[in-house]
Amino acid sequence: MKRRSKRLLVVGFVSALLSMLLWPLLFARADFAYKLNRTVQKVHVRLAVLCGQKPRPVSLSGKLVGSGAFVESLKGAEVAAVESTSGYAATTDEHGRFIMPHLIWFPGARYTLIITVDAHNVRRVIISAPATYPTGGVIDAGELLLEAQREIPFAKSPIRHMNHDALNGNYYKDLFERLTATAETDNDKIASVCRYVATRRNFYENPWSFRSARQILERGAPHCSNLAFAMAAIIAAGGYPTRTTHTSDTPEFIHTHVVVEVYYDDAWHLYDPTYGISFLGRSGGVAGYKELRLDPQLITEKAFRGIEPIVVKEAMEWMPNAYGSGLHQFYYINEDVFFGGA
């Protein structure tokens, strides 16, 4: 027992030392955070194994609470764990509740939660794992008072970037201008691009062979991730803040789907280039991911107008759950880093 206790003390000391040494680097560059943390996490896990502890998968649940102006911030807030093995984040429900899968438990483990309400309100909180594996494999973090958590700049949070190629920049810009030549509103422009990309769906191409969005557009592609990447490249070339949004109906990734969100009129709006559609929110405009997560009933068959009934039926069987689960990843266009070419 004494030897085991000493081992645990060593694990705790080394883990704390690593955290102190690497924490300043963790947020030095947002897109570097995930890569660095995976390395740190692996070191922690190996130390636990050496000390006779068996690391095990675990989820973390909790509830955001607040008062005054913070009450509305509890709905649809993004909760991301830097230590997530998949990179998927959770979106709180209408009551501020969330459950974060894909974490690893071992004695002494700590989880850094980044709570993002919007670009002006980002909070950080650290949760410690219990000494013993939790019943049901879920750690209950309890209630987290939003305004009491430490604020950090959005730019310093571990956001992920999506890269696209500079060599074809003029190609995407020319394509955007051609597709939106007669469009009058932001929605008209984005919807036109979305419908065009949907026509490029090609089930006979190898989805892993593409080196650029231009290749996807010229050859056609089978997967939603390919089409979302291509649409995002065109929209970003048109000057819009853009991100791809990756969703899943369950932590086991039974049904996953990738779409595009575009920022205009002070809000994110979601477009699905696999089907060439968007969904209307309660206010009548195009809904974003957050609104669809909080109200998946907005996903209706009417949006799939003109699409084969069998395709619509299949999509309606899983799509509401893919948004309603709250599981997601965001990849923002990074115009400073490029790769590939046609």
Image: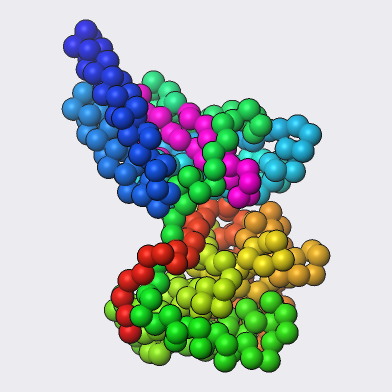
Q: How is the image coloured?
A: rainbow
- What is the total number of numbered labels drawn onto the structure image? 0
Regarding residue 161, the answer to whether it shows in the image is yes
Residue 147 higher or lower than 218, as above or below: above
Write down the region rendered in magenta: 102-127
Left or right of 166: which side holds 278? right
Q: Quadrant of the C terminus?
A: bottom left
Q: Which quarter of the figure has residue 169? A: bottom left
- Residue 110 included in the magenta stretch of the image: yes
Question: Which residue shows up at 69% across the image and 58% down it?
Answer: 291
Foreground residue among 217 and 107: 217
Q: Please name the residue shown 76% across and 70% down the image.
A: 285
Give the camera-side residue of 161 and 306.
161
| Percent coordinates x, y for residue 112 in the rendering | 45, 35
Answer left or right for 289 relative to 41: right
User: On the image, which quarter does residue 71 sit in?
Assistant: top right
Query: Is 15 above or below relative to 197?
Result: above
Give the x, y percent position of residue 287. Answer: 69, 66
248 horizontally vs 67: left or right: left
Answer with left or right where residue 161 lies relative to residue 118: left
Residue 28 x %, y %: 39, 43
Tell me if I can see residue 299 in this picture: no
Residue 241 colored in magenta in the image: no
Q: Main secondary structure of the magenta part?
A: strand
x 55%, y 67%: residue:
242
Q: Residue at x 79, y 64 (%)?
A: 282
Report the quarter where the N terminus lies: top left
The residue furthest right is 283
Quarter location, residue 8: top left
* Coordinates of residue 34 in the picture (x, y in percent): 37, 48
